[in-house]
Amino acid sequence: KAGVTQTPRYLIKTRGQQVTLSCSPISGHRSVSWYQQTPGQGLQFLFEYFSETQRNKGNFPGRFSGRQFSNSRSEMNVSTLELGDSALYLCASSLGLAGGITSTDTQYFGPGTRLTVL
Amino acid sequence: AQSVTQLGSHVSVSEGALVLLRCNYSSSVPPYLFWYVQYPNQGLQLLLKYTTGATLVKGINGFEAEFKKSETSFHLTKPSAHMSDAAEYFCAVSDLMGGSEKLVFGKGTKLTVNP
């Protein structure tokens, strides 16, 4: 079974631009979560989508948004990029049963997209 | 809200020595606990998880962790370190919010294995 895939793997943008990252979950998984990883803040939860609906959201500004398609693929968008948005963006997929992580469900992570903002 | 504290941002051991990575959590309800490993330029790989039942959990690559409720700890161990274990390790706890759960991660511990 193929794992979680993220595209692109690396991205360089300049301040003020916007960017879209893509995540394809494991086949059969309906929940997709996004995390930002930086050296200073560590891994922080951005948001979670399940069946095309945002089910959970972390403490990030409105410049960060996402969506999920009917095939469970998800995209996240960051508008008006700032230097501090430079990070590794990780996507994780899970079955999404019973409202989230359960004893029989686990989040599986993709390799991430490394975003550099100049 | 749940939180996770990993003691020691860097741990260095010799090949063949015991690996002990510490994790303490704060949770008002019985938590689900996880250890993930991240190799350079890669995503996170699940090592093991505790949900219910046996408090000693065995994972991949010879790692295991013990859930100790009285100490609110979930330390990760491996009896004999291998060079390939060099990576960053993250402890995480599930946090229920808004009707669904998310993972709250510790800051990570970078493990170095010396020959």
Image (cartoon, helix red, strand yellow):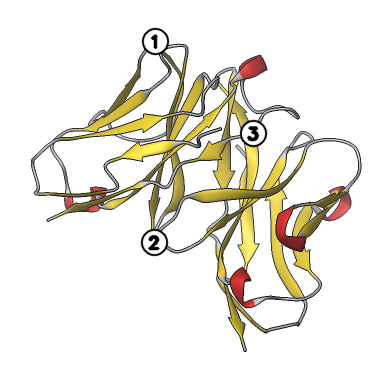
Name the N-terminal-most of marks 2 and 1.
2
Identity of the residue drawn at 72% across and 54% down? B60
**Quadrant where the C terminus of chain B lies?**
bottom right
In the picture, measured across the screen, residue B49 lies left or right of residue A8, that is: right
Residue B3, position in %: x, y? 61, 46
Name the N-terminal-most of marks 3 and 1.
1
Question: What is the count of numbered marks?
Answer: 3
Q: Quick one: label 2, few (<14), some, or many (20+) residues within 10 Å?
A: few
Residue A67, position in %: x, y? 33, 19
Which of B25 and B62 lies nearest the eye of the viewer?
B62
Identity of the residue drawn at 88% across and 47% down? B55
Q: Name the residue under label 1.
A: A70
Which of the chains bears the disc numbered 3?
A
Q: Which amino acid does label 2 sit on?
A: Pro
**Quadrant where the N terminus of chain B lies?**
top right
Q: Quadrant of residue A46?
A: top left
Which of A21 and A18 lies nearest the eye of the viewer?
A21
Residue A40, position in %: x, y? 39, 60
Q: Quadrant of residue A23?
A: top left
Residue B14, position in %: x, y? 68, 86
Q: Mark 2 points at which residue?
A: A39
Compared to residue B42, the image places residue B82 above or below, namely: below
Q: Which amino acid does label 3 sit on?
A: Thr
Q: How far apart are marks 3 and 1 (CA)?
A: 21 Å
The answer to whether residue A2 shows anywhere in this view is: yes
Identity of the residue drawn at 60% across and 22% down? A95
Q: Mark 3 points at which residue?
A: A106
